[in-house]
Image (cartoon, rainbow, N blue to C red):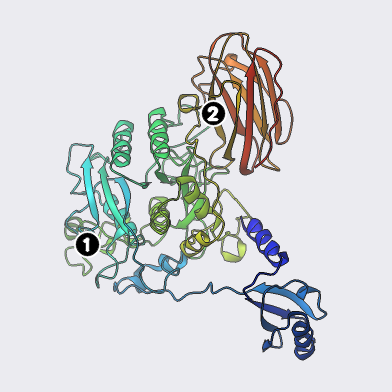
Amino acid sequence: MKRLALAVFLLALAAPASASAARFAVGLQDGASPRLVARQIEARTGRHVSEIGPFALTVNAVSARGLDSIRGVTWVERLRDSRRLSFTPNDPLVVNHQWYLNRIHAFDAWAQVPSLPSVRVAVIDSGIDASHPELQNQIAVGASFVASSWQSDTNGHGTFVAGEIAAALDNGQGIAGIAFPAQLLVAKVVHNDGTISPDAEAKAIRWAVDHGAKVINLSFGGMRDPDDRTRDTYSPLEAAAIQYAVSNGALVVAAVGNGDGAPSEPWGYAGYPAALPHVVGVSAVARDGSVPSFSNRDVVYNDLAAPGEDIFSTLPRALTLDTRPGCVLQGYSDCGPIEFRRGEGTSFSAPQVSAAAALLLASDPQLQPDQVAALLTGAANDAAPASGCDRCSSGHDPLTGWGVLDVEGAIQSLDGTLPAADHFEANDEASTAARIWGRRGQQIHATIDYWDDQVDVYKIKLRRGQRLVARLRGPRGTDTNLFLWKPGTRRVAGFAVDRRLLAAQSKSPGSLERIRVRAQQSGWYFLEVKAANPGAGRYSLRFRKGPRRAALRAVLP
């Protein structure tokens, strides 16, 4: 995304002059004479040049064409008013307790609290202290899917998560929630023993979507172990509920999981549901920028990191009074059970990303879930040894994904070219394949992402003996594969794939693929596009069907 933005900027410099002038800064080489360089710029542009210092000049001009070729000039920058003052909430515990707000630049995008439309954020968790003064006015509606009221939270986890997202801002007490436009949909799914059943989770997701959730926070997970099916907790029901949410316009954010209960720590796989398509999987970073050993790693499904140690938030007042009755900060994590006092875990990293997503959607309500995810990951600050993560590498890495959450950067990205939306999602399996029609054929433009959306599936009806020709042009530099599955196919990925139902597959390496086949039976066939190696972007898929040999081409948009 940064390279694309740079390319657009360079093209703008090379574009023909427009009628209105812009401001440009011109960098000077060491030892170059500002006066001599200024004369040359004035001769070329006909505009007055001002000196900033021995290192740079400024000029108002209709074009910067040719300025970088002047002797003594090292760079040319078009100046935009991109720096802004940030507001500081008046909530008294912000400065000394919520260190993570500065780390993620939570409020740096605005000089004062903006007026934004409300966004419904679902907290599917252990319930909430609905009478908590920080939260009571932030709740839209709630529901319980276990045998206790959603308005009580004996565990405390749900109230902690809710406070990070939506604690009342600028109310002169307590803490500040990151997503100040958020209205909470509270779904209680945690049993008294701390467990969550897949059916309660699925019902809660369905309920949240049907009540207008645009963001769904899931600060829980089950173990993923691709090497041992007996330990792997993949749930088709959970996956179906997630797909329902994505298909209906909700962004799902989930913790990648902590190493608790894993065979080793750190554990090398994100848990479920973070390891499902289109879910933004969130890991943890510490104050010093390192990645704690409890935070699960994952080569593919770790999308983003956020602070996950020493997190301070709200807790049910009944819980804090019972735990530490003499504690001053009743209703906050300092007064709670020991497991909340240092607030550590990817469970407390994920709500920060959910809150950032809500701010993006409040700023631009037309955004689609995949666009929000792309903006968040594209604006992340790449973790590296220089920032405290000794084992992090440039770009996507297993410890922090695309980097550490930057709310300000994501908000400012809205001023640039937005990532393309894929309106066929969530078509990740045969059961949710997008139907494609056309008597003779059709051309499709969509996106694929090795880290978040490896597979797209399209459903096409063929008659026995009918010929199908399909060609794919995948994102440049990405090895893409094309498969055709027979009628009766239930799954194209995972443990339960029946390879006997594979009708054809492309053989070419790289991004250009083709399948040509004659149907052996009538019915619905499944055309699968798959990203086989790291890469992401837009692809085009064109198919043609008919009783005779069909020609077909695919061209990138």
Amino acid found under the numbered disc labelled 1: Gly
Among the 4 quarters of the image, the one containing residue 74: bottom right
The answer to whether residue 218 of the structure is visible from this angle is no
Tag on residue 349?
A: none
Residue placed most toward the observer, 487 or 450: 487
Among the 4 quarters of the image, the one containing residue 41: bottom right
Which residue is drawn at the image coordinates 81% and 78% (left, top)? Answer: 70
Q: Quadrant of the N terminus?
A: bottom right
Residue 18 coordinates in the image, percent (x, y): 66, 69
Left or right side of 403 for 480: right
Residue 519 coordinates in the image, percent (x, y): 62, 12
Residue 378 coordinates in the image, percent (x, y): 55, 55
Residue picked out by circle 1 = 331
Q: Is residue 515 above or below residue 247?
A: above
Amino acid found under the numbered disc labelled 2: Val
Left or right side of 86 for 167: left
Which residue is drawn at the image coordinates 16% and 57% (left, top)? Answer: 131
Residue placed most toward the observer, 173 or 518: 518
Q: Nearer the viewer, mark 1 or mark 2?
A: 2
Which residue is drawn at the image coordinates 55% and 50% (left, top)? Answer: 419
Q: How busy is the neighbourhood of tag 1: few (under 14 within 10 Å), some, or many (20 plus)? A: many
Q: Is residue 493 above or below residue 245?
A: above
Residue placed most toward the observer, 341 or 455: 455
Tag on residue 457?
A: 2
